[in-house]
Amino acid sequence: MDDNKEIPKILMVDDKPENLVVLEKLLAPLEATLYKATSGNSALTLTLEHDFVLILLDVQMPGMDGYEVLDMLSWDDRTKYIPVIFITANYADEKHQLKGYRYGAVDYLFKPINEQILLGKIKVFLELYEQKQQYKQLQKRYQLILDSAGEGVFGLDLKGKIIFTNPAAAKLLDTKVDQLINQPFSNMLKITDNSDPFEWEASELYKTLKSGNVLYKDDDIFIKFNRDPLPVEYTASPIHNEKNQVAGIVLVFSDITLRKTVEAQLTHMALYDHLTQLPNRILFEKTINRALARAERHNRLIAVMFLDLDHFKNINDTLGHDVGDLLLKGVGERLKTCIRESDTIARLGGDEFAIVLDEIEHPEDATIVAKKIIEVLKAPFNLDEHEVFVSTSIGISVYPLSGSDSITLTKNADIAMYRAKHQGRNNYRFFSNGMNEENIHRLNLTQGLRHALKRDEFFLCYQPIYDLRQKTITGVEALLRWNHPTLGVIQPNDFIPMAEEISMMTVIGEWVLKTTCLTCRPWLEKFPRLKTISVNIASSQLLQRDFLDVIGHAMEQADFNPKNLQLEITETSIMTNTARSADLLNRIQELGVTLAIDDFGTGYSSLSYLKRLPVATLKIDCSFIQDIFDDIDDAAIVKTIIALGKSMNLKTVAEGVETQEQLTFLEEARCDEIQGFFYCKPITATEMEAFLQKNQ
C-alpha cells in the first residue's frame, strides 16, 4: 500500500453497540478506517474531527434521531456533502423512505441488511473517493508542471491592449510573444453574445479593475490563435501608478483542461450508469423536474414510463451475471432506438429502466412508444454463445393526469408496471386511480404471504386423474390453496407470482412436496389401482441447488416409493435454460421419479427439447380443451399433441375436461387420461380418500 495514500474513513452510527459490531464485521474486508458512534451528538462530534467518505446512519435513536443528525450536518459546508445511507429496522415503509430522501440521504436500507447490496453501495463511494484522490494527485503533478513552465501572464493597458506577455502565455495560446504584443485582449476572449459588438469598457473585466478590485475567474475560456478553445482560470489585478490611480492590468492565467476533464469524468460517474452509460436515477429525477417545468410553461403533457424485464432473475441465475450484464447493455441500446432525441432513457438499477417522453401532445403517444419497445425486444439477443429471449412489462403515468410532481409520477408509473406484470407480462398499462387501492391490496397480500406458512394457512386439494382405457382412477394431482384469514380461499394464480417475487416459492414448494407425500402414502396401499401422485414444481424450485435433496428428503420422510411420484414442470421453466434443465431432470429421473410437462402447448414448444428431456407425460392445457368444438385450431392442436405423444411413447393427459362431448372427443382421439370438473373438482384430502374408496 502507498504510505502517502489517505485511507478513507466511514462513520457507523447506531444506538445499539451490538449492531455496530455486526456492521464492523461486515465492513471489515473494505480498505477503510471505521469509526463508531452510539448517538447523534457523538456522531456530530466525530464529523468535526474527521473527513468521512460515507456515514451509515441509524434512523431511530433516542435523543437525536437520524433525520435530525442529517439536518444538522447540512448546516455546515464542510459536512453537508457527506453521503449518508440510512439503515433502519422499524421505519421500513415508503413514507419514511421518502422522508429520508427529502432530508438528503443517498439511500435508505432496511434491516436485516443484505450484505452484498450494502457492500456494493459502499464500494461505489470508495471508488469515487479513490477517483478524487487520484484527481488531487493529478492536480499536484499538474501544479508542479505549471510552476516549472510558468503561468501565462498578460500586461494590459486601460484600453485592453496587450503591452506585455511571457513565453508561457504564448505557448499556451499556440503562438509567439511578438504576435501577442499590441493585440486587443478581446481577441483572446470567447465572446458568447454575437448580437452586439464587444465593448471593452462595458466588460466585467474593465469595470472590476477600474474600480480597483481584483477579478478572479475559476472557469473561463480563452481562444488560441488557431481558434481552438482553451479552458482557463485567471486572476486580474489592477496596476496602480504613483498617484494610486489604475494605470493598467496584470492578468495571470493557467490551463485547466485537465481539471475540466477530471470534473467531467466525475460528473459522468455520478450521473450515469456505469454498465449501460445511460442516465442513472439521480439524473433521471433531475430530468423529470426540468421536463415538468417545461410542460407547465407550454401547457403540454409528459409521460413517465417504467420498464422491468420479465424473469430477468432466471437469466442471471441460470446463465450468470456476465450474460445478464450483456443483456442489460443490449436492452439499453435497443430502447434508444424507440425514443426521440428530446426524450430521456435511464437505468434505475437492476433490470429497471425508465423513460421520460418530453412534451407529448396526447397520452396515446406513449402507447406508440410502448408498442415499439415490446416489438423491438422480441428478437433474440445473442450473448456469449447464448440465444436469450426477453420481454418487458411497462407502466405509464402522464402529467398532469397521473400526478403533478416527479415523486407521484414515478410512483404511479411503478404501480402501473406491476399491474402490467400481473396481467400477463410483456405488455403495458397506464396508471389509473383504482390501481392505488389495488396496490395497497397487493401489499397486504404480500405481507400476509410472508407469514402464511408458519400460520398454517396453506392447505392442499386433490383432483383425480382418470384413465380412459382402464376406466379407473390411476392418479391424483395435489393443488395448493391459501386460506387467507380475511379474504377466504385464494387460488394459486393469485398468489404464486407474488411468492416467486419475494423468493418464498422454494419454501412453499418444499412444504407442498412433503405434505403431499405424507398424505398420499397410505392411499397407494389402500387403493391398488392408484399409481401416480402428481405435484407441481415452480420455476424457482428448479434453480435450487439442493432441490434433489429436497425431493429425496420428502420421499424418505414419508417412506414414499419414487415410482409413484410425478413432478409437473411447465415448458417455460424448462426453456429458461434447456441445458441445465436437461441435466437436472435426468438426475431427478435417476431417483426413480417420473416427469410431466404441464400446460403443454402454451410455452416455447419444441420437439428438439422433448427428445432430450426424460419426460413421461404431456399434460394438454385446459385452454385448448375448453374451445375444442368452437375453434378448429384448438381441436387440431389437441389431436396433434396426442399423436405426438403416441409417436414419442409419452402419456397424454387432457386438463379441464368439463362435458361429455369433450370426453367423447378425447376418447376418439385416443387420449390416455383426463382430469377436470366433469369427473371431479379439486377436493380436500378427507373428501378425496372417501372418493377413492367409493370409486375403487
Image: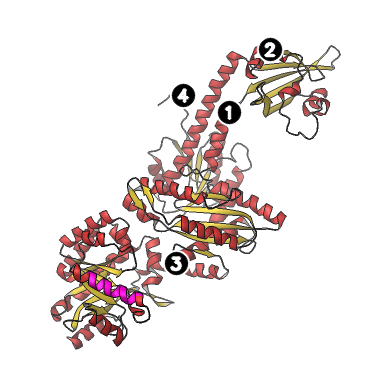
Q: Which mark is residue 422?
A: 3
Does label 1 or label 3 sit earlier along the sequence? 1
Residue tagged 4: 4
Residue type at tag 1: Arg
Circles 2 and 1: CB atoms closer than 8 Å = no
Q: What is the spatial separation of the Cα atoms under label 4 and label 2, in whole angstroms?
A: 41 Å
Residue tagged 2: 177
Circles 1 and 3: CB atoms closer than 8 Å = no
Task: Say if the magenta span includes residue 643.
Answer: yes
Q: Which residues are magenta?
A: 633-644
Quadrant in which residue 407 is drawn: bottom right
Residue 691 in the image: above or below residue 585: below
* Residue that appears at 30% across and 57% down: 543
Q: What is the spatial separation of the Cα atoms under label 3 and label 4, in whole angstroms?
A: 56 Å
Q: Quadrant of the N terminus?
A: top left
Decide if residue 183 is on the left or right side of residue 146: right
Residue type at tag 3: His
Frontmost of labels 4 and 2 is 2
Does label 2 or label 3 sit earlier along the sequence? 2
Frontmost of labels 2 and 3 is 2
Residue 382 in the image: above or below residue 484: above
Local packing at callout 1 (Cα closer than 10 Å; few below 14, some 14-19, many 20+) is: some
Count the labels in the image: 4
Q: Secondary structure at mark 3?
A: helix
Local packing at callout 2 (Cα closer than 10 Å; few below 14, some 14-19, many 20+) is: some
